[in-house]
Image: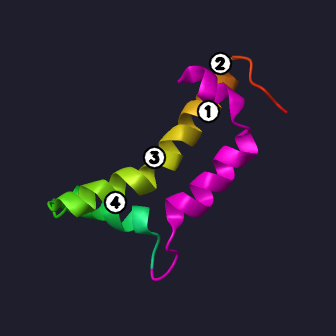
């Protein structure tokens, strides 16, 4: 799994986080709505948890990718 993360370009991970992680954009980003529900305690339906997982995964992937780059792990650039 780590080798897969290293093979993905940072730009690709960033674009995925911005587009997949924030879609739909209006009236507010979906991941933001789900995080607010989580904090307020209203994230109770399984579909809401699934939504949070799907819209949060690109952000988690991006965080792992950036952490690996900052820690000096080699990444493929091409």
Circle 2/circle 3 CB separation < 8 Å? no
**Along the polypeptide, which appears first: circle 3 or circle 1?**
3
SS of the residue under disc 4: helix
Decide: few, some or many residues near mark 4? Use Cα within 10 Å; few <14, some 14-19, many ≥20.
Answer: some
Marking on residue 71: 2
Decide: few, some or many residues near mark 3? Use Cα within 10 Å; few <14, some 14-19, many ≥20.
Answer: some
| Cα gap from disc 1 to disc 4, whole angstroms | 22 Å
SS of the residue under disc 3: helix
**Along the polypeptide, which appears first: circle 2 or circle 4?**
4
**Along the polypeptide, which appears first: circle 2 or circle 3?**
3
Q: Residue at x 20, y 62 (%)?
A: 40
Q: Position of residue 50 (x, y in %)?
A: 29, 55
SS of the residue under disc 2: loop
* Above or below: residue 3 compared with residue 37: above
**Magenta extent:** 1-27
State which mark lies toward you, 2 or 3: 3
Q: Which residue is mark 3?
A: 57
| Cα gap from disc 3 to disc 1, whole angstroms | 12 Å
Q: Which residue is mark 4?
A: 51
Marking on residue 65: 1
Q: Is residue 33 left or right of residue 75?
A: left
* Chief secondary structure of the magenta portion: helix
Q: Position of residue 33 (x, y in %)?
A: 35, 68
Q: Please say whether residue 9 is one of the residues in the magenta stretch.
A: yes
| Cα gap from disc 2 to disc 4, whole angstroms | 31 Å
């Amino acid at each position: 799994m780590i080798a897969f993360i290293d093979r993905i370009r940072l730009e690709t991970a960033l674009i995925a986080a911005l587009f997949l992680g924030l879609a739909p954009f209006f009236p507010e980003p979906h991941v933001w709505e789900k995080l607010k529900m989580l904090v307020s305690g209203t994230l109770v339906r399984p579909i809401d948890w699934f939504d949070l997982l799907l819209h949060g995964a690109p952000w988690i992937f991006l965080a792992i990718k950036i952490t690996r780059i900052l820690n000096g792990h080699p990444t493929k650039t091409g």
